[in-house]
Amino acid sequence: MSDSPAALRLPLRQVLLCGGLIVTLSMGIRHGFGLWLGPMTMAHGWTREDFALALAVQNLAWGLAGPIVGYWADVYGARRVLIVGALCYAVGLVGMALATTPMGFLLGAGLIVGVAQAGTTYSVVYGVIGRQVPAEQRSWAMGMAAAAGSFGQFFMVPVENALIVNLGWQQALLVLSGAALLIVPLAFGLREPRQPQGTVQPPPHLGQTLRAALAVPSFRWLTLGYFVCGFQVVFIAVHMPAYLKDKGLPPTVAATSLALIGLLNVFGTYLAGTLGQRLPRRHILSFIYAARSLAIVIFLAVPLSATSVYVFSAVIGFLWLSTVPPTNAIVAHIFGVRTMSTLGGVVFLGHQVGSFMGVWLGGVLYDATGSYTVVWWLAVALGVMAALVNQPVREEPLHREAVAA
């Protein structure tokens, strides 16, 4: 879509409201999945690795489905993809509630919910933002959408904890299944206007898009950095409640910790998106990854208490999804917006491979060593690496016409 005044666009408020609410629901529901680790493993007699493997598969399925789902959104429109994704989300949550074996849980929580998240989160919504928001406001708008997802994490975690306490873990999942269906009516708010014939070229074939993107070194560096992002945040989100329980802290501390992460990330993602309009985005990304590593080192070094957990959660929350707006804004700037959902899905695949490794290794190494120490320090080392690999990223469009794509 052209950035010219002749392009037909949805109202900015409508895009941000509907897109923000969709991401709030989709990201908010998944952010609290770690709260189910304790009650589900105890109820079924599963190991932590059984639970962690299902969520690891969830993240991998999300990533693998991302480029395909993103391509469908670019070609057929985000509305259809969002509706199918919402239906899959509801089915997957019911599957989580009714699963009686690790394999059944892996199918519902892992495969189905993972595919659903690919169709209801950032790559699809950011594709609409990229096409419907002028370039000079794009990074800011992406920051707004990411902030909405962060608010969902802040809002939904205490809600999910309250549902578990008052209804039980199984009924809580059924309630969330109904909440996921609210994405369906919101999807109609992102139905993009049909452009005059001849003003918009269709996206290239999926294979052609992938080959062109992977040939660009900056795209590969971004994807590698995103791998680290996924490793860090999903390890913390899933295993933090169990880690704090092992250290003798009450469940309310874990719930408050996850809620603080969501709350502070509202401000962090908004600031990252806003700064992305003014500063080199590669420097913003390097700072975020380096600051995460420093925060983890300090958290492990000081005596553990509820206060230290809350301070760490606030700091790491400020940095949590703040990588999302600058990363996607760089992709849009380099390649244009015609293939935004497709390439957003591709770079997010790197994030989800990292998520798989973070949540799975957390379970495996805990079962092998009785501790999360090795994974914490691996997260530190990877953060330093990500800070370095983002520096060679070149924030220049491949072709001059991509700026107006």
Image (tube, grey):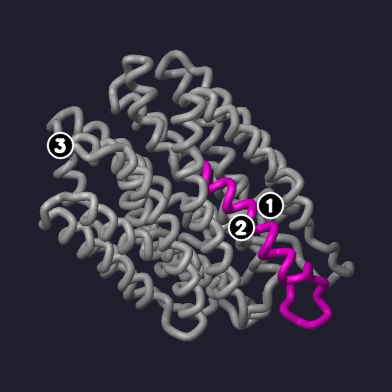
Amino acid bearing label 1:
Ala
Please give the name of the residue rendered at 51% of the width and 82% of the height, measured from the top-left corner.
277
Give the residue pinned by disc 2: 341
Residue 62 spot, x, y in % from top left: 50, 42
Q: Per the image, is 275 magenta?
A: no
**Which of the marked residues, 3 or 2, is nearer the chain's N terminus?**
2
Stretch of the chain drawn in magenta:
1-29
Cα gap from disc 1 to disc 3, whole angstroms: 42 Å
The tag on residue 23 is none
Residue 205 spot, x, y in % from top left: 66, 54
Comparing 66 with 285, the one in front is: 285
**Which of the marked residues, 1 or 3, is nearer the chain's N terminus?**
1
Q: Specify whether residue 207 is in view.
A: no
Quarter of the view holding residue 13:
bottom right
Q: Quadrant of the N terminus?
A: bottom right
Q: Residue furthest bottom?
A: 278
Quarter of the view holding residue 321:
bottom left
**Pointers 1 and 2 in contact (CB under 8 A)?**
yes
Please give the name of the residue rendered at 38% of the width and 55% of the height, measured from the top-left corner.
260
The tag on residue 73 is 1
SS under mark 1: helix
SS under mark 2: helix
- The 10 Å Cα crowd at callout 3, few under 14, some 14 to 19, many 20 or more, is some
